[in-house]
Image: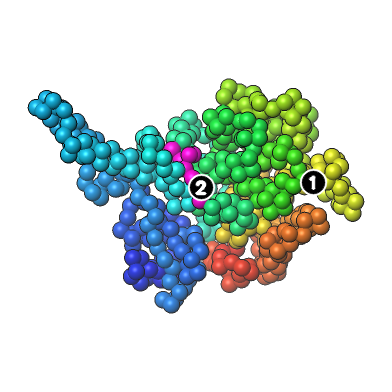
Amino acid sequence: MATKVIYFTFNGMLERAEFSTLDTASEVKDLFRSAAEVTSFDIIKMYNSEGDLVNITQYLKSNTPDTPYRLVVLATSTDSLMKEVGTDLNGVEKRLQALESHIIVENGGLTDSMRQVQEEMAALSQKLEGIEHLSWIGLSKDINGTKRFTKSSKHTWHNKCDVEITTNNNWKKSNTDFQPYSCQSESDMDCETVFDKFNCMRDMEVRSEVKGLLESVNFNNWQWNEAEMLVLLRQMYLDLGLLDTFNIPKSTFHTWLCEVYRSYNRVPFHNFKHCFMVSQMMYGLIQQLDLKSSFSPAELFALLTSAVCHDLDHPGYNNSYQVNARTELAIRYNDMSVLENHHCSVAFRIFASEGCNILGNMSAETYRHVRQCIIRCILATDMARHNEILSNFTQIIPTFDVEIADHRNQLMMILIKCADISNECRPMEVAEPWIDCLLQEFFTQSDLEKKEGLPVSPFMDRDKVNKNSSQVNFIKFILLPLFEALAELHPVIQDPIIGPLQDALEYYQKLSSSTNHLPATSFSSKPSALKRKGTSVESPQTNGV
């Protein structure tokens, strides 16, 4: 069994860790928690020799004692801290209250020293109550001297869109063992846990370096939890001035965000984390392309909100399945852009629900314009319309005029399409787990189609998919033409987006040429010696078509 040796420092001391390449990410993280002598309640992070944050997984790149990683404990949960100091905060508070009563009875009031103890106890209580919500991600409390966190319930934290990926890439499973995953929305208990965390963090100040990261194609969603993502979605709207421009009460906006979260299902790919990544890419494009200078505030609002809502209530089974299985959705929408129509419908039902109407203070004219833009953008994410939309856009590029409404509309459709399928523009350690998530969703659908005797798409069949060849085709024939068309109008994306896509294509072409005779189920779990430019990740996986 292959092992990997990692050198790292902790508290200034050089340490050595060894683990199997077959270990899971959770097992590797537990190993480093043991090295730091902390518990699973604690937050640990790893930095490389250049100071960049890296994922603590079995794919950590081997290093030498001269280039050690740096292990840091960035936050400690309340439960862990109380165990460590051996203090029962509630018990201390009760004893303090009893002492206060005794002093008041004896002396007719609190002494100055007792008031000082009382104030220090309140400060300690506030600090401990807030500690489990303070994150390494760059959020810091907005200290105003009066705010006090409310204790949240101690439910087990559950990431609804985490997907367990086997290290041996063994996707093969007989149809007789098939069990479709649940595509139900998150339970009320799990939602309330996320909402509690979000409510405790939402008024924290997001540091400038994190705001900058939000504009970057290198943003890594795997390092953030869902409550933090809600905070960052909120920050995007604030930074674009959309809440002020459209007079959206913050309480209404927060309720809307939570309802959006609740309306994404527990499916491997088309989940809330995907929603966030599409929204983050859209926000980055708005900032990097300086769209504020060419689009109206209503259009910027529609672009970002379309990204947030574009896959609401996705069941994990695509339009082809809906039509072939003659589902209720297919019947309702007459087999035309079935899911995209459904996502639009859900979005506007949320807007119409109590406490969620972030469109409520718009004029009738602005509302109509925003609604038309949102519907147009979400319907454009139907990949069946890809060639049509791209062809229409390329025809207007030579004479593009941002003052022409139809030209702006076509550009908006291209932008939402770019944001929707942008994973391969990102670093390998970000993109590859998404490929695994998408394949799990594909394979689950194809297993069900086989079981029900429905047509099976070859690119979704676990017995036929070649991951590297799929990547090559997806990047070469879908992604590059799409982003290159956008680059003709906005050359600024050439280096941060087109360049990494070309590197990715070269990477997968090399892998495909050496493994094109192997099906997806035959790949070795051993990391490949091939590396994509600009990344230290060693583990190739598959495509996101």
Q: Amino acid at mark 2?
A: Val
Give the mark toward the camera: 1 or 2. 2
Residue 63 drawn at (x, y percent): 46, 73
Which residue does the image show at 44% across and 35% down from the upper left? 196
Q: Viewed as shown, does residue 143 lie left or right of 545?
A: left
Q: Residue furthest top?
A: 354
Quadrant in the picture for the N terminus: bottom left
What residue is shown with label 1? Answer: 411
Residue 229 in magenta stretch: no
Residue at the location (74% across, 47% down)? Answer: 293
Q: Please, what secondary structure does the residue beneath circle 1 have?
A: helix
Residue 332 shown left or right of residue 26 in the figure: right
Image: magenta residue range: 200-207
Which three-letter amino acid code belongs to the residue tagged 1?
Leu
Instruction: Where is residue 413? Give x, y as percent.
Output: 77, 43
Query: Which residue is disc 2 drawn over?
Result: 206
| Left or right placement of residue 301 versus residue 396 in this view | left
Compared to 33, does 526 lie above or below? Answer: below
Q: Quadrant of residue 309?
A: top right
Q: Determine the secondary structure under disc 2.
A: strand
Which image quarter: residue 177? top right
